[in-house]
Image: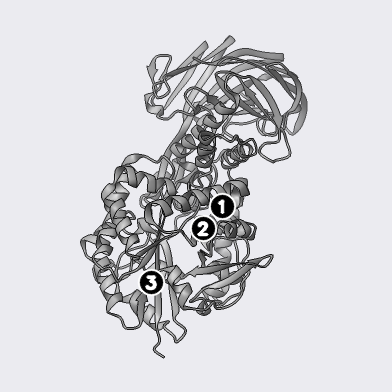
Amino acid sequence: MMKKTALLLGLHCHQPVDNFHEVLDEAIVKSYLPFFEIAAEYPEFRFSVHYSGWLLEYIRDHAPKLFSLMQKLAFRDQVEFLTGGFYEPILASIPSRDRIAQIEKLSAFIETHFSQRPKGLWLTERVWDGSITRDLIACGIEYVIVDDYHFISSGFDQHNLNGYFVTEEEGMKLKLFPINKHLRYQIPFSPEKEPVSYLERIADENFSAGIIFDDGEKFGIWPETFEWVYEKGWLERFIEAILDSDAVEPIRYSDYLLRAKPISLAYLPTTSYFEMGEWSLKAKDALELERIKERLSENFPAETIEKFLKGSIWKNFLVKYYEANHIHKRTIALSNDAKEDPLYLENLYKSQTNDVLWHGVFGGIYLPNLRDNAYRFIIECENLIYKDHESILISDTNCDGYDEIKCVTKEIIAIFDTKNGGQLCELDSRDRTFNYANTLTRYEEAYHDKIRHPRPQKSHPPIKEEEGISTIHDLDAANLEAYKPYLITDWYLKNCFVDHIVDTRFDLEPFQKCTFAEYGDFANQPFELIENREQTIGLEREGGIYIDTHKHPATLQKFFTLEGGKISFDITLDTEVKDLFYLMEHNLHFADSSRILIDEHPFSDSVGILRQQTLSIYDPYTEKTLLFAFSRPVEIYICRLDTLSQSEAGFELTNQGISFGFKIPLSGKSGLKGSLEII
């Protein structure tokens, strides 16, 4: 019997829900459309694709040429469509009922438009958790795509993964295909002869499989790929080399199941690809993991290291990033309160998209527009629940063991976090479906170490055209020295109504760089709920002010009354300490902070020091004014809140909001009354 290899080529194409249209249009023109145009010229070149549901809707409505090509290739059985969550959630992170509903929604769309009932499922970010097995089978799923790392970390050997496996849950069986990492890094970056040669080498009498299912954006959107894949003809050469090979046959995943037997039974750990395990670690742990890998590499091959060395799991992003957990738990609560209303469910499912909840090579949680979109969907759901009703709800929504207090008026939704300083962590304008507290804390990231301690750049000769192009993981970030001033890490969350005790040295620069001296223990410690009546809540912390290692007792009380679009506040600090200052910090988010007006003047980078009793911020995007009013003059400090994060293009400085500090001197029992109103 002749030795053969099946090429199981799959492309996964996804864009964050409601991403900028220009981004989608570029992806269509430079990646999705040219791939289908070239594939259409080779009917014998069979492959599989997964497009997230809302992206398919966008293509149907805005790119009819591409949509027609997709249908043409589907109708002639050249391409197979895989299903998944319609809005690309991490399936293990959403409730079972939503998981089933999202899969069924995409499967129905595919069946309606492409006359295929999907048998395979694209597992978002390949986040495997055995708890989802029953739901997948209930949706008629026969097979799922995961990484070879899933198997390697479970004890399987790399050389024995060229096929599919069977797993089970309570006797219900599901087939698993492991993506070949070697092919994932070769296609489309290496010259076409290299992956073809590799496929020919792994051919055997049992019809082995060369399994690859990877981002469609690698074919045209990633750096250098449009020129390489299309303009220089890589894709045509690759397809022709595959079709010319007697040992390689390109087929669809479902067809392979009909022609080959499984390799064995397999049980997988809760995991994703190896890099995801690194990214989900906190910075110091990720750096330690990297150091351990380097030491082990002196004595062990990479496969052995990956088999026994592991990072964290995807859900650890919800521990790593407070803001990601807040969004995630808001969606969980909305699912638990779900209304049988199609509009409600549509917004709920959109809010469950994965992109905003994590961060690796791409922006993720660091992209304000993704968070804006998530909150828009969340607020739309809330509006359908509360309509014109007002309410105060107390519950541990974010699952940290402490209560959050959600205050709902006809105009705003305000959420206070008792664990973290009794701070305001969400401030929603209901009619504009916009969260003004949607800022982001400046976290330490492992890749910041490249800037703090740059290593000598390895000298690589220029890659010759016949040698291929760099993958995104190989691209070096340039001008690292220029980023050093932006390496700022916050020790408290960048919310609103943050309480500080500072000294005379406090100024704009240490405020912006988070290097000011803190004497109190109120900015990141729990508060107790001491009052809850009608639309008023009271919070208290019996804490301290620390001077020369000595603790001076200090009690801080915060009372908030909500009416319409106004939050009235009454802050009292009872302490014997004098000669210091109380600072109330607010961090506010705007869709485009470069356009806001502060007291009718354009804002650039910073403002200080003002001494006044009112401050107005006009936001052209929402056409609203945020007005601070105080019972006494306060010193005001204003500066940008920028994060430095990694992206596919290198390092990016992203504005997350504007920080406001309002300062008064301490004098025994100090007090500050006022209001924050959205007009």
**Residue 359 visible (yes or no):** yes
- Mark 1: give few (<14), some (14-19) or many (20+) Cα within 10 Å: many
Q: Which mark is residue 91?
A: 1
168 or 662, which is in the foreground?
Answer: 168
596 or 671, which is in the foreground?
Answer: 596
Q: Where does the image place residue 664, in percent across and percent down from the top left? A: 61, 16
Q: Which mark is residue 123?
A: 2
Callout 2: SS: loop
Q: Are marks 1 and 3 in contact (CB under 8 Å)?
A: no
Q: CA distance from mark 1 to mark 3?
A: 27 Å
In the picture, residue 154 is in which quadrant?
bottom right
Residue at the spot x=52%, y=42% of the render?
349
Residue at the spot x=65%, y=57% of the render?
131
Amino acid, disc 3: Ile
Residue indicated by mark 3: 251
Specify the farthest residue to the bottom: 1
